[in-house]
Image (cartoon, grey):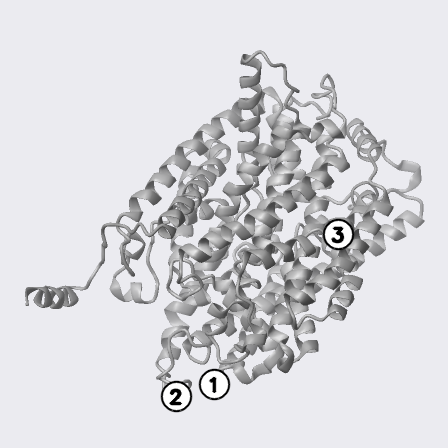
Amino acid sequence: MDHNSSSTINNRKPESSHEEEENADHSKEILTVLEEKDHEATSSESSVEKIFESKEVPPWQKQLTLRAFLVSFVLSILFTFIVMKLNLTTGIIPSLNVSAGLLGFFFLKVWSKFMEKSGILGQPFTRQENTVIQTCVVASSGIAFSGGFGSYLFGMSETIAKKATEANDSQNIKNPALTWMIGFLFVVSFLGLFSVVPLRKIMIIDFKLTYPSGTATAHLINSFHTPQGAKLAKKQVRTLGKFFSFSFLWGFFQWFFTAGDGCGFVEFPTFGLKAYQNRFYFDFSATYVGVGMICPYLINISLLVGAILSWGIMWPLIEKRKGDWYSATLSPSSLHGIQGYRVFIAIAVILGDGLYNFVKVLGRTLLGLYQQIRDKNSGSVLPVGSSPSPSNTPAVSYDDELRTRHFLKDKIPTWVAVSGYLVLAIISAATLPHIFHPLKWYYVIVMYIFAPTLAFCNAYGCGLTDWNLASTYGKLAIFLIGAWAGASHGGVLAGLAACGVMMNIVSTASDLSQDFKTGYMTLASPRSMFVSQVVGTAIGCVVSPCVFWIFYKAFPDLGTLGSQYPAPYATVYRGIAILGVEGFSSLPNHCLTLCYVFFIAAVVINGLRDVVGPKWAKYIPIPMAMAIPFFLGPYFTIDMCVGSLILFIWETLDKAKADAFGPAVASGLICGDGIWTLPSSILALVGVKPPICMKFLSRKTNVRVDAFLGN
């Protein structure tokens, strides 16, 4: 979305906000802290597995319990609502693995104690079962992201298409419907799992890839099942519960004052009315205060810098050119007007950042593969770091020997993976053209020929750097398949559909590789990891479309600029598809020049961050994060910076307590406000409206309103 019970790690789906690099560094820093904490907690014990030596490892069938999947199903619904809300508001999705791990541990502990008090001797709750829950929940809620409900899938809709005059004909539009969304996800979401299964031993045992997120998740689960970790986890769950309740009740309280457009606390002009017009205000969102507490400081500062650069400087200057650079009669949401500059300049930054990181990670992947194959051929071991000569090869530790034995014990036959991939590929090639008519069967076949290689590259690169480049591969598919289909044959819709196919394959491949690493370190069987991922994916293929459908039906203005759920990335992805098919003719005057400047700037800034090294890079903003407020506005960045400020002050006063309980507080704020969307959606569906509209007016406007009402 992965760490010890006192920290948080990077999101496994980094596309939507803080993309790859900062999260990778953040995960590695946290991993170091985790190892230090584990060292302290075990009183200088050198072996983690010796702590669990007295506990029998259950066979893989017993790791997959009914209670684990029941808990996973409940948590999947909760987290899907949270991810969906974040998808449709700003697209910034933090890691929710902490919450999944904590709540999974809590529910199973309560279940076990209840069964004991009832006189029923149930199966002991093990770390392997905890791993199954974590894997299942993250796989399920991850579909809410990779399913494209806030990006490529919703970008196909008429709501998003009518914002532009290009490619808004019927052959480039596909409105959401439960049947085809569920069918599409079932067809494309499992291929990535089968593509990476044959390579699990190479990734985990031979190449010894780090997978910081998967390793940190294992530390989290291992720590929960020690006496000290269980005690801390219970305290963290209580803290999460308190802030969950506060956040839920705060969302409920705010609802009473939102009876019309522009009403409620979310419209409070914190910095004055002029700043409010440029979207600089604090909107009292518990969700984004919590997100700000989880995201690294540099992400939040980068967002703020991007907000000031765009809404504080650039857009006011461009708006002064109205009537010169673009027509003064266009609607504010038209891509030929000011909104076109906001969207396409943001796209230029996103593409520049994505291309740089793609080339960088691909280069590291190829270099790493070359070095490891060379070292293997020379007879040495295959660590990621230095390669000692055979004569001084270090002895394998007790932990590694035990983990390797368990990891290799329950093999997944290669023929199962290969045949599963081929069967699903044939079904997909036959099915997808019926769902998306411009997406021809041979486009699908070509993608599936190259997909395993790309899935391997993404999974391998993720193991080295913790960067998931699924979104970059998806954007690449938009351009290639969209251009192949052509503007006159539904190229925009074909490109967006191809994006979904490619994103799902390469994203699930890296996710499963992370899970294999987690299972390796918790002695969970690869078979249980694979089955858990499959079950979680299947749950997500049903739950995510249903949750999106609730939003789609409850909020008629979904995807509209300035609405409660503007779905900004849907506009961006459709803009990318239009750009790939229609070319640059769709851009407003001088927009192309500005796009070139910002594309180059994104590449240069990323290069500068690498040149100066980690010590100084933490002071240089991240282009991807800077681009997000370009079209959405700064209001959520204010919330996130408030979250960062709270955490900074807390760490200054009591760093140990902030490390231990900060993630729980943040998760509680996110979960409470996120789950409030369920009752608020139900109220909207049944036609129950809030009783009060609270608005904030200038003195002059208030005088005019009073005069009007007096008449």
- Secondary structure of residue under mark 2: loop
Type of amino acid under label 3: Tyr
Which residue is situated farthest in the left direction here?
711
Type of amino acid under label 2: Asp
How many other residues sit within 10 Å of disc 3, few (<14), some (14-19) or many (≥20)?
Answer: many
Which percent across, then down, holds residue 44?
Answer: 67, 23
Would you say 219 lies left or right of 89 here? right
Q: Compare marks 2 and 1 and give the one earlier in the sequence.
A: 2
Which numbered disc covers residue 202?
none
- Secondary structure of residue under mark 1: loop
Viewer-side residue, 267 vs 190: 190
Residue that numbered label 3 is attached to: 460
Residue that numbered label 2 is attached to: 324
Cα distance in 3D space between marks 2 and 1: 9 Å
How many other residues sit within 10 Å of disc 2, few (<14), some (14-19) or many (≥20)?
Answer: few
Image-quadrant location for residue 399: top right
Type of amino acid under label 1: Asn
Which percent across, then down, holds residue 85?
Answer: 46, 52
